[in-house]
Amino acid sequence: MLPWRLSPLLNPAPETLRPKILQSKDYDLDGSYIRKWVPELARMPQSHIHEPWKMPPDVASQVSRSLA
């Protein structure tokens, strides 16, 4: 018989299988959680809060100037 402690390893909950970016977009729509716990992203535009690495260079330079 399999110990009950190992059951999550064999049958994980569906939310653990979803990519973290999608979870972030679904559950933190306005990015408030990200802004609170990642202060470097506090002034990030709403459109780039979940994937800041996809931000165009011109927007990135504006954000970096506002952080300085």
Image (cartoon, helix red, strand yellow):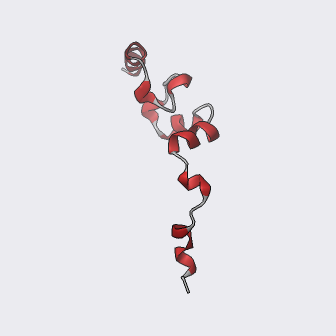
Question: Which quadrant holds the C terminus?
Answer: top left
Asked if residue 14 is positioned above or below residue 64 in the image, the reply reads below
Looking at the rendered structure, the number of numbered marks drawn on it comes to 0
Asked if residue 39 is positioned above or below residue 16 in the image, the reply reads above
- Of residue 1 and residue 5, the one placed in the foreground of this image is 1
- Of residue 63 and residue 10, the one placed in the foreground of this image is 10
Residue 57 screen position, x and y as percent: 37, 16
Asked if residue 11 is positioned above or below residue 46 in the image, the reply reads below
Question: Which quadrant holds the N terminus?
Answer: bottom right
Q: Residue at x 54, y 82 (%)?
A: 3
Q: Residue at x 51, y 33 (%)?
A: 50
Asked if residue 19 is positioned above or below residue 1 in the image, the reply reads above
Asked whether, in this view, residue 64 is left or right of residue 38, the answer is: left
Residue 67 screen position, x and y as percent: 40, 22
Residue 63 screen position, x and y as percent: 42, 19
Q: Quadrant of residue 5?
A: bottom right
Residue 16 screen position, x and y as percent: 55, 55
Q: Quadrant of residue 47?
A: top right
Q: Residue at x 61, y 31 (%)?
A: 30
Asked whether, in this view, residue 45 is left or right of residue 60, the answer is: right
